[in-house]
């Protein structure tokens, strides 16, 4: 139940509504724009509409952001629109264009006009940048050129709607607005996430013992081709136990319980097993953030927890193949200590951004292109981890 309040609905209001309900990595990348806005105008009121499960991430970006729940129920969305209509919004940034978000904004603006006689709040819409060229022309280009043009990074992509929205002039200083328009200047990096370690839902004493190296083998269920093979993870674990004295953690979400159990079973007879702990989907999002904030190095693919770890300031070894580093590579406050590994140059079809492989190419050595990420060897990952442990 939302309680109505009276508010000045003049178009010069110093509030913005941001809409991005998920996913985890996208919220992390969009957070750079939110923090930039608050840094440019500390008096700005930011309201962010997202899925309740991701509230801890937005709250870790900046405590000044008011987070609102995105509900699947149309009735609840309508009730929230009625409440949001009372805010003195200069505009809305819809980072998640869809029928549902469109209905939410339609309801908000309808209530603004009917109940308060206010003009509709202007909306800036996000558009994902596509590759500059495709098809035969893309194949004729050099690999380096096509990869460079694959896509701009998500951090810059989320900022682009603001750069073209006239209502932003109402919430920024004249100098900041002119610089943004002329120089296209925006977020220069990703803000450090600061999890609320003292929150009631986090019992730090109940968390697993901190690990110097956290391995995140899962990538979720939507893009399984981003996952490094279990055999490669086992080879890396054995090498880490041999070449370091570090404590290791294998961290998985609820969907990766079986994978974590498989890896733990695979190292059951390896010397040093007492330094390995499996965490099979038992941590909530706040607990995972708290746990990762105490680690040194995180290894994983293009998946939300790795992006969270990068934003927390962890050193990262990212494993990328079908997805583009230029588009969704890890970003964080410790960018100099983020290493991304990709398949060998001989494999020309990556990054393809596809959910399944459609290429018949193979490496000269006989490697199968249908598992391009499998062409990243455990030896290369071990080398990258050692560089980070030793301070590069």
Image: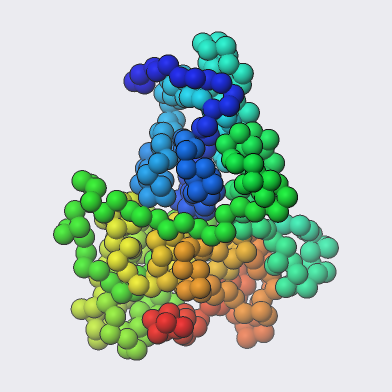
Horizontal and vertical percent for residue 90? 57, 29
Above or below — where is 323 with respect to 342?
Answer: above
Q: Residue at x 46, y 83 (%)?
A: 392
Above or below — where is 23 with respect to 82?
Answer: below
Horizontal and vertical percent for residue 342? 58, 74
Horizontal and vertical percent for residue 324? 61, 64
Q: Nearer the viewer, residue 386 or 42?
A: 42
Q: Residue at x 24, y 47 (%)?
A: 199
Q: Residue at x 56, y 77 (%)?
A: 375
- Would you say residue 169 is visible in this rendering? yes
Quadrant of res 92: top right
Q: Residue at x 41, y 36 (%)?
A: 66
Above or below — where is 385 with respect to 177?
Answer: below
Give the position of the N terminus as an image quadrant: top left
- Would you say residue 224 is visible in this rendering? no
Horizontal and vertical percent for residue 171? 57, 36
Q: Nearer the viewer, residue 240 or 372?
A: 240
Q: Nearer the viewer, residue 332 or 352?
A: 332
């Amino acid at each position: 139940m939302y309680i109505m309040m009276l508010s000045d609905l003049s178009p010069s209001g110093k509030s913005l509504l941001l809409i991005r309900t998920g996913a985890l990595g996208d919220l992390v990348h969009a957070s750079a724009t939110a923090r930039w806005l608050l840094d440019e105008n500390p008096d700005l009121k930011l309201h962010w509409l997202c899925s309740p499960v991701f509230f801890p991430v937005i709250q870790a970006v900046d405590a000044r952001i008011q987070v609102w729940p995105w509900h699947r129920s149309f009735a609840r969305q309508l009730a929230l629109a009625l409440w949001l209509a009372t805010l003195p919004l200069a505009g809305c940034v819809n980072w998640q264009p869809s029928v549902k978000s469109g209905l939410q904004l339609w309801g908000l603006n309808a209530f603004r006009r009917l109940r308060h006689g206010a003009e509709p709040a202007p909306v800036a819409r996000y558009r994902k940048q596509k590759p500059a060229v495709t098809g035969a022309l893309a194949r004729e280009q050099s690999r380096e050129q096509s990869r460079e043009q694959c896509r701009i990074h998500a951090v810059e992509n989320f900022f682009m709607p603001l750069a073209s929205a006239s209502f932003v002039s109402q919430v920024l200083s004249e100098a900041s607005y002119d610089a943004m328009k002329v120089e296209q200047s925006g977020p220069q990096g990703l803000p450090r996430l600061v999890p609320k370690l003292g929150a009631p839902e986090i019992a730090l004493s109940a968390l697993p013992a901190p690990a110097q190296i956290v391995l995140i083998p899962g990538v979720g269920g939507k893009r399984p081709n981003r996952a490094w093979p279990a055999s490669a993870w086992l080879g890396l674990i054995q090498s880490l136990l041999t070449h370091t004295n570090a404590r290791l953690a294998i961290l998985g979400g609820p969907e990766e319980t079986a994978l974590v159990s498989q890896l733990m079973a695979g190292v059951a007879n390896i010397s040093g097993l007492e330094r390995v702990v499996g965490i099979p989907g038992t941590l909530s999002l706040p607990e995972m953030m708290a746990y990762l904030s105490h680690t040194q190095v995180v290894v994983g693919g293009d998946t939300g927890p790795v992006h969270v770890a990068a934003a927390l300031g962890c050193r990262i070894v990212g494993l990328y193949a079908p997805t583009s580093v230029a588009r969704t590579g890890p970003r964080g406050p410790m960018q100099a200590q983020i290493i991304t590994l990709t398949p060998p140059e001989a494999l020309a079809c990556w990054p393809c951004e596809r959910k399944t492989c459609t290429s018949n190419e193979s490496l000269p050595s006989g490697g199968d292109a249908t598992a391009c990420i499998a062409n990243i060897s455990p030896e290369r990952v071990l080398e990258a981890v050692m560089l980070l442990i030793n301070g590069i």
